[in-house]
Image: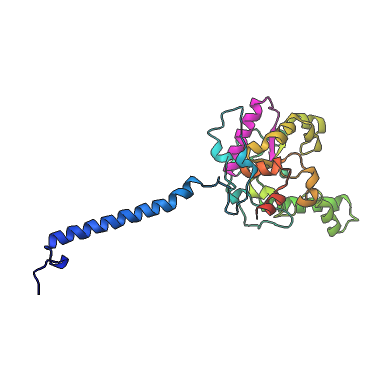
Amino acid sequence: MTNQPNHTCLPRSRRRMRLLRRGLFLLLALLLALQGCIQPDSVDEPPDTGDDTGKTFLYQTMQYEYTTDVSAWLQYIVTGMDPQYLILANKTNPLNANDIPETVRLTCATNPYNQRDETLNSCAANALYAMLAEMAADGVTDIFVTSSYRSYDRQQSLFYGYIDEEMSKNPALTREQAEQLVLTYSARPGTSEHQTGLCVDFGTNAEYSEAGEVLTEYFEETAAFRWLIENCYRFGFILRYPEDKVGVTGYTYEPWHYRFVGREAATEIMLRGLCLEEFLNELN
Ligand SMILES: [Zn+2]
């Protein structure tokens, strides 16, 4: 037994102070070590590639310029490739009867020759308003929406109505033959993209006075079409059924039909000459 003091014999308060100091020192050392681990990564962080697969996209290097002040609309135009705006509805990916999107009534110009309420997904509607404002600022004012959201039920009654019409026009046709004929100009229920609430068909007065109706190839001759084909991607819209993609989309060329997908996907699709099916294949 010696009188040599040892740590365990220190008065309790001093021992507590020493333990506290040692704890603080260890904590500080740990924090410094962690900082050393994190810092080099954050300094050399690669640019955001938009997804986890390391793919790079055209939109990441794009400078978007607008004639009008679109700052209040950007939240609708720039959707960050949100899957809800990349829904695919075509002949091989039909929607169900109970796929019913939330829509709002459009407040822009609609077909004056066939007055009815047009409704659309609210984000797509706001992006559409921004696009129409920009078009007007660029001097293109002859344009209206002639078709937008269409329910499964409405498409069903249109489709079967057309079959009945074809059969009464030509009684020699079997029901199956009439159906094949109708499929060349109308979509089977569930396969119309209009059921997504994300697309619109445009018409113009010039087209109506020239062709006597809208949704004609004459739309291609209008100033509205020339503007849309150049600019729609800047507002998140794409020409959905291009002339050179009939074999991929399964639909004939429709210069009047524009689909909202958000600015990122629209940039890839329009500037790289893809269609939605090709882009989604590339993405997945
Ligand atoms: Zn359409």
Instruction: Give the camera-side residue of 49 and 185.
Output: 49
The quadrant the N terminus occupies is bottom left
Q: Is residue 164 left or right of residue 70?
A: right
Instruction: Give the camera-side residue of 22 and 264.
Output: 22
Stretch in magenta: 121-147
| Residue 115 appears anywhere in the view | no
Q: Is residue 28 left or right of residue 123?
A: left
Q: Is residue 172 above or below residue 225?
A: below
Figure quadrant of residue 215 = top right
Instruction: Give the camera-side residue of 263 and 138.
Output: 263
Instruction: Give the camera-side residue of 22 and 118.
Output: 22
Residue at the right extreme of this rendering: 172
At a point 73% along the width and 57% down the height, the residue shown is 92
Quarter of the picture for ligand 1? top right
Q: Is residue 252 left or right of residue 42?
A: right
At a point 56% along the width and 40% down the height, the residue shown is 76
Figure quadrant of residue 176 = bottom right
Q: Is residue 182 left or right of residue 145?
A: right
Residue 12, percent across and down? 13, 63
The quadrant the C terminus occupies is bottom right
